[in-house]
Amino acid sequence: MKFVETAEGRLDILLQIDLQVSSGEAVAILGASGSGKSTLLGLLAGLDEASAGEVRLFDTPLSSLDEDGRATLRAGKVGFVFQSFQLLSGMTALENVMLPLELAGHESPEQAAKEALSQAGLARRLHHYPSQLSGGEQQRVALARAFAPNPKILFADEPTANLDAHTGERVAELLFKLQEQSNTVLILVTHDEMLARRCDRRLYLREGCLEAEA
Amino acid sequence: MNPLYLALRLLRRDWRAGELRLLATALVIAVASVTSVGFFTDRIERAMERQATEVLAADLRIESNQPLPDSVIREAERRQLDQASTLSFPSVILSKGATQLVQIKAVSDHYPLRGHLRIRDSVTSQENITSLLPGPGEAWLEERLLPLMGLAMGDTIKLGQSAFTISRIITYEPDRSANLFQLAPRVMIGLNDIEKTGLLGPASRVRHYFLVAGSPSQMSHYKTWLEQLNQSGIQIEDIRAARPELRLALEQGGRFLRLAAATAILLCVVAVALSSRRFVERQSDTSALLRCLGARRRQVGQIFILRLLSLGVIASLVGVLLGLVVQALLIHLIGQWFTSQIPAPSAWPLVSGLITGILVLIGFSLPAILRLSEVPPLRVFRRHLGAPPISYRLFLGAAIISLGILLIWQIGDDLLAFQLITGLLVGMGILLIVSRLLVHLLTPLRNRTAGSWRYGLSSLSRNPATTSVQLTGFGLGITVLLLLAIVRVDLLSNWRDALPENSPNQFLINIQPDEVEGVRKLLIEGGIKLTGLFPMIRGRLISIDGHQVSSDDYDNPRAQRLSTRDFNVSHATQPQSDNRIVAGHWWSETEWNEPWFSVEQGLAETLGIPLGAELVFEVAGRKITGRVVNLRSVEWDSFNVNFFVVGTPGLMLDQPATYITSFYLTDEKRHLLHRLIQTYPSITALDVTALMQQIRAIMDRGALAVESVFLFTLAAGLIVLYAGIQASHELRVQETAILRTLGLSRSRLVISALLEFSLLGGLAGLIAAVLASAISYSLANAVFNLPWQLNFSMWSIALLGGGLGVGSAGIVASWPLLNTPPLVVMRKM
């Protein structure tokens, strides 16, 4: 459960959420704007704390961990893909992908990053800066960054919303290909029904409750 | 993960992205100003001090009434110090059947070690600086001896068993001023000639002087060695113990320079604080992403701190290099003003520059940067979540501690540093409160206006926190600049006014009571403006509150000297115009017969004379007892006649006195002096023009140095301006793009930006004028002891200058935004 206290009183955002995701599964969460999709994603990834109830990540109750404990839990095991790519503008594609590997203490971050970028079809763009890449290429760098440490779970927030249909399709293909290869759990928040259909399960967030597809 | 490696990579990234350019530039300017000011003031102060050592003709002078012990001379030789010796004693010269009491000075080779002798070849010829010394059988005479004895150049004078030919007129000897009140005129001969005069008998009153010079560290070690030697009968003098007028001029000059350096620091810390705030705003995304990717808070903190420190070291090094270049240019520009060579830069300002850079970052950037580790990772989804507000306790604590260390260290004056920090904090508090209030008052105004005015006003009230920070930043910047302008113009000219052009340059002493009226008449008829003729009574202080005065009671060499010498005591009904009563009260007419004394504050402190103490003086074998009813501060650099001790007329009127006066004499009226000396041969005339020129030169060079330092502060002020404008840059990028997309014309955007920044600058200028007036009042009163007056023109300059300066700078800074297509801007957002 997630609520916030406002001047007008308590505002409930998420009320009844009961979600279990097993290894290798891809789950799409759909919902209208403001329905609380991103809030749910934040709670599941341990970026935010639930007001009530329990979130277990890798069998660890997140409420038992402090902020740093949750960060340690995420390091190398949790990947993120964002709508706005969230690449560091002053770093090259290679450096951006190396970042989570270094944080996770990977032995050879550069080699792993190169392989990840190669898998994303960006072997020739290693030393390009985000501003020198197209939107699709930027999102592919973000995917390479997310999958490079071999995460157990990947949270994707509207990964194709900022891209045109064609580029979005190619990015989606790469996303599901990498997810399948690495057997990573995928939690995908999207408006896009087509994209959601590629997932194993589709869940709808309506008035704070999570419902399976009718 | 190696945090340093990541920090350095991120630093490289930041530099490429331009993230840290503002902070780095602020830091480079901070360190460059401090370092160049440091190098510059260090070198100038050392040059000024070196020039001031001319008063001793050496860096250190050892005086004794016996030939100096061999050990003292050998140690100076061992330390490879430059040395010279002089002897001085009163004697009588004979010529053309007349005799005259003179003060003989015999000088060795290499004299003077500091400064130069100035001579004339004849009475009418030009004065020249010379490195010559009197040759064998030659004597150089003081000019007043010639009319006194009817002598001419080439005449012979007899001194003891030897005859000397008058070969030069000596017009200036650097160390003469240290012994201003030598009564007899000077005759200078070579040291090798002294033996054959046969005047150095056991009963002669010879003073032996051993002069040494060397590097500051050599002098300091040698002085320590001398003090540890604890040799009785020798006195060690350095510039600090020499004439109080010069010491005061030097100290005052140093204060101005250090204050100018401190103002540069104050401005730079404001710039660093402003740019750090912006850096935190711009780095919140990176922090959130790092935490999202699994970095712990401590790791994020480490990464940002290491980044900051790396930046600090690099920027400080660049700043030090820049400082070195700039000071070299300045030294090149003003070097010609110095007669002595300016010493090479020492390493200390380099170290202090680096430490300054790090301290500025710790005090004014670190508290803000530390907030970055607190950015919630959820910001990756919710952009409005940012770093938590800064802890004011942490910010103030770090700022006060680092600024305290910096200012006390730079200024070397705890009181001044305390006043500046208090002034800055109070000013910052007032600026924050007033700016919040102004933003609050502006909000309703925007609804009553239209067009560009409305956009301009709404820009100010849309984000009260940013506007307050901008107003505070601009306000502090303008306050410091105004303060420096006041210091430069008002305080500096007041300082120079303390020694006006027509300050007394002649002293007449040894005027007998029956000559007073005649002297007064002669001078007034000659068109001389007299301040008065003052009685002077020789007396020795023998007890304070019943306790016998002995040099053994004091550790301080000055106190030891004062306790054994005769004082010139006077009596007066009114205090001198340049005296200020600092404790007690001056006697009224009904109290003129009370047995009371007035004592100069410095003397009272040195000898431990409290207010109310009972003093006993011995005057001509009689004991005079009186109570100290007031302490006075005296402006020794005014060149007026002043006395350490003044008694009531009732106490001192009957004592045997001679009279003294001082006045300003132009070159055209010098004949008056000759007439006076011929009419009253027992009167001694002393010309202090050369000494005054020396002091005036120190003041002028000090003023020039302060004005040069002002340029650095101005540069720092511009950075504050830029940092202040950049504080709202992100918001402006967004709004400009939206407004232009919606069709608002560029000209209206320019006008609204101009209104916004001009209003900000004008308001900041107005508040700054109030603050600067208050601080300058406190500085003038408490620190520089100078008169103060409200400077109304400063208020209008602050208001207009702030408005125009910030307004035009705002337009310049916003120009790229106004000229970039909105689509390009939107894409970057």
Image (cartoon, helix red, strand yellow):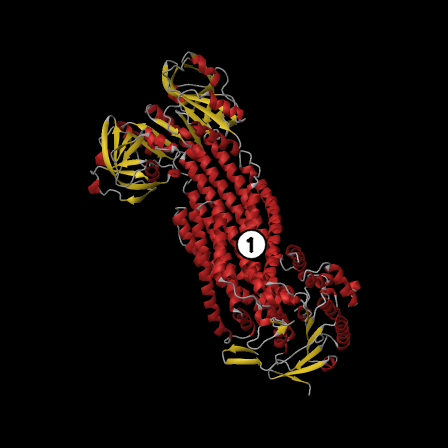
Residue placed most toward the observer, A18 or B36: A18
Residue placed most toward the observer, B152 or B651: B651
Q: Position of residue B162 (x, y in %)?
A: 43, 12
Give the residue at x 32% y 27%.
B510
Q: Position of residue B726 (x, y in %)?
A: 58, 62
Q: Is residue B276 left or right of residue B673?
A: right
The residue most toward the front is: A59
Quarter of the picture holding the C terminus of chain B: bottom right
Q: Quadrant of residue B745?
A: bottom right
Image: B119 above or below B426? above
SS label for mark 1: helix
Q: Examine the rendering and report whether any part of residue A83 can be seen.
A: no
Residue placed most toward the observer, B14 or B425: B14
Q: Position of residue B315 (x, y in %)?
A: 61, 51
- Kind of residue at disc 1: Leu
Q: Examine the rendering and report whether any part of residue B647 can be seen.
A: yes
Residue placed most toward the observer, B800 or B772: B772
Residue that carries the numbered disc 1 in the rendered image:
B361
Tell me the crowding category of disc 1: few under 14, some 14 to 19, or many 20 or more residues within 10 angstroms, Cα based: many
Give the residue at x 50% y 65%.
B468
Q: Is residue B711 left or right of residue B621?
A: right
Looking at the rendered structure, the number of numbered marks drawn on it comes to: 1
> Which chain is mark 1 on?
B
Q: Position of residue B617 (x, y in %)?
A: 26, 31
Quarter of the picture holding the N terminus of chain B: bottom right
Image: B548 above or below B635? above
Q: Quadrant of residue A165?
A: bottom right
